[in-house]
Amino acid sequence: MTLADLSLIVRRHIKASPNRVFAAWTSPEALKVWWGPQGVRCPDAQVDLTVGGHYRIANELPDGRLLWIEGIFEEIVPDEKLVYSWVSSDLQPAPERVIVHFKPVREGTEVIVVHERIASKAAVDDHTAGWEGCLDGLERLGLIGDVF
């Protein structure tokens, strides 16, 4: 198995329009509300939503440690698609890539997260759990409706 072979795909139906879900994914204030798996809080988020722009998201772990996720936007198609690099620690051998599709479906949006170039099977499992937890938060936010 090579680095190129390690990837994951997670999907979730969100009861909000692609425009609103895209806005929640790219707004620092919204990210602070929904980002992170259970037990992880997002105390800070910075987003320069331009191709070549930088993003940085803080994950406050249950023990109080901060883990920063950051990267560069490679492609932005408003309300449809985001592609960005992903670096979550100094120990990560190379940047990973995340592609997020926002597909209009009946009564909302199907969010499809493709996370590529993952360094190990253990990291695939960790990222899968992390994305599932993040999408749980986004789904709850979509149910609230007026937050984003």
Image (cartoon, rainbow, N blue to C red):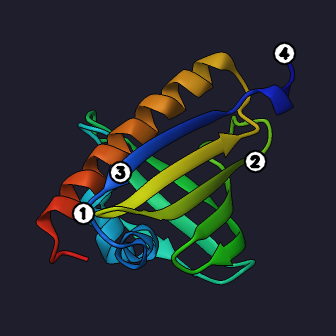
Mark earlier in primary sequence (3, 1): 3
Kindly report the distance in space between the C-alpha atoms of the residues bearing marks 3 and 4.
31 Å
Q: Nearer the viewer, mark 3 or mark 2?
A: 3
Q: The disc labelled 4 sits on which kind of residue? A: Met
Q: Dot 3 corresponds to which residue?
A: 13
Q: Dot 2 corresponds to which residue?
A: 95
Q: Dot 4 corresponds to which residue?
A: 1
Count residues near mark 2 (Cα–Cα under 10 Å), then give few for <14, some for 14-19, many for 20+.
some
The location of residue 19, given as percent across then percent down, is 41, 79
Count residues near mark 3 (Cα–Cα under 10 Å), then give few for <14, some for 14-19, many for 20+.
many
The location of residue 17, given as percent across then percent down, is 35, 73
From the viewer's side, name the closer residue of 48 and 2: 2
Q: Nearer the viewer, mark 3 or mark 1?
A: 3
Quarter of the image for the C terminus: give it: bottom left
Kindly report the distance in space between the C-alpha atoms of the residues bearing marks 3 and 2.
28 Å
| Residue at the spot 62% in from the left edge and 42% down from the top edge | 89
Mark earlier in primary sequence (3, 4): 4
| Image height of 83 relative to 88, above or below | below
Q: The disc labelled 1 sits on which kind of residue? A: Val
Asked whether disc 3 touches disc 2, contact meaning CB atoms under 8 Å apart, the reply is no
Q: The disc labelled 3 sits on which kind of residue? A: His
From the viewer's side, name the closer residue of 75 and 59: 75
| Residue at the spot 84% in from the left edge and 15% down from the top edge | 1
Residue 33's disc is: 1
| Residue at the spot 16% in from the left edge and 71% down from the top edge | 145
Label 4, secondary structure: give it. loop
Query: Does the image show residue 60?
Result: no
| Residue at the spot 57% in from the left edge and 71% down from the top edge | 80
Label 2, secondary structure: give it. loop
Q: Nearer the viewer, mark 4 or mark 1?
A: 4
Asked whether disc 3 touches disc 1, contact meaning CB atoms under 8 Å apart, the reply is no
Count residues near mark 4 (Cα–Cα under 10 Å), then give few for <14, some for 14-19, many for 20+.
few
